[in-house]
Image (cartoon, rainbow, N blue to C red):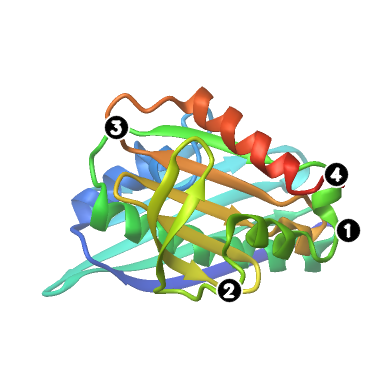
Amino acid sequence: MSKEFEIVEELAIDSTPERIWEAVTNGTAAWMFPTDQWPSVRTVDEYPTHLVTRMDGPDGWFNQLEHVLTPGENGTALRYVHSGIFVDDWDNQYDGASKHTAFYLHTLGEYLRHFDGLPVAFSAIQGPEASKAPDALETWLSALGLDDAAAGAELELQLPGRGTTRVTVDFRNENFVGLRTSDALVRIFGRNAFGGPVGLTVHDFATGADAQANTAAWQEALDAAYQG
């Protein structure tokens, strides 16, 4: 049954309103996923402090994103509000969306702090059916060598397509893990907790980065983690 929702996040980002505005309008592939094909309308467009985008559909359906940006001495305060209507499985969808939101906004901060303005090669990879199992995220993290690595840890990992790589774990909770290298952000999503497969995105800022090569290397490794 359809039901409205609202997800609110407030955080400080070490950047300017202008750079955050650019990231959430034209640079989403660098920290979330490409949104340039979404048929949204800007219902509020007050550069660079207040932006509301909205999509409307049949029977009152809508999806709306609001960004309120307040500059300060030590960066910018962001108030983010995602509202709309979930059609089915409201509780599970709300839980998944709210937890994804916190991870995405953290990643926005990481992008602006370390890679702002750099061209990005974006890849999205989904695990096989077996990655929907309750312990699937732990299986994948173990395959990567991340069993006990907490947020803030710095370590060397064998990353698909990259070999031995120095990595900072910039985020970790029970559902998501964020990895940062000198030239990339890797975001790991334990969507098995919400009925989906484990997945990941690669945001590669290296000169000459190849999104297709990244996709192939990570897909092979992710699939292999659930074989046998």
Residue appearing at x 70%, y 68% in the figure: 95
Q: Is residue 49 left or right of residue 198?
A: left
Quadrant into which the N terminus falls: bottom right
Q: Nearer the viewer, residue 4 or 25?
A: 25
Q: Is residue 163 left or right of residue 18?
A: right
Residue appearing at x 34%, y 36% in the figure: 26
Q: Is residue 70 above or below residue 196?
A: below
Say which residue label 3 marks.
119
Image quarter of residue 7 = bottom right
Measured in 3D between alpha carbons, the distance from the residue under mark 3 to the one under mark 2, in whole angstroms, is 29 Å
The reply to whether callout 4 and callout 3 are in contact (CB within 8 Å) is no
Task: Give whichever of discs 2 and 4 has the lower sequence position.
Answer: 4
Mark 2 or 1, closer to the camera: 2
- Amino acid type indicated by mark 2: Asn
Q: Nearer the viewer, residue 178 or 13?
A: 178
Q: Is residue 115 above or below residue 84?
A: above
Say which residue label 1 marks.
1
Locate residue 88, reporting x and y percent.
Answer: 85, 55
Q: Is residue 209 left or right of residue 134?
A: left
Locate residue 69, reporting x and y percent.
Answer: 28, 62
Measured in 3D between alpha carbons, the distance from the residue under mark 3 to the one under mark 1, in whole angstroms, is 42 Å
Task: Give whichever of discs 3 and 1 has the lower sequence position.
Answer: 1
Say which residue label 2 marks.
173
Task: Give whichever of discs 3 and 2 has the lower sequence position.
Answer: 3
Mark 4 or 3, closer to the camera: 4
Q: Secondary structure at mark 1?
A: loop
- Amino acid type indicated by mark 4: Glu
Mark 1 or 4, closer to the camera: 4
- Amino acid type indicated by mark 3: Pro
Q: Nearer the viewer, residue 112 or 4?
A: 112
Locate residue 56, reporting x and y percent.
Answer: 63, 40
Task: Give whichever of discs 4 and 3 has the lower sequence position.
Answer: 3
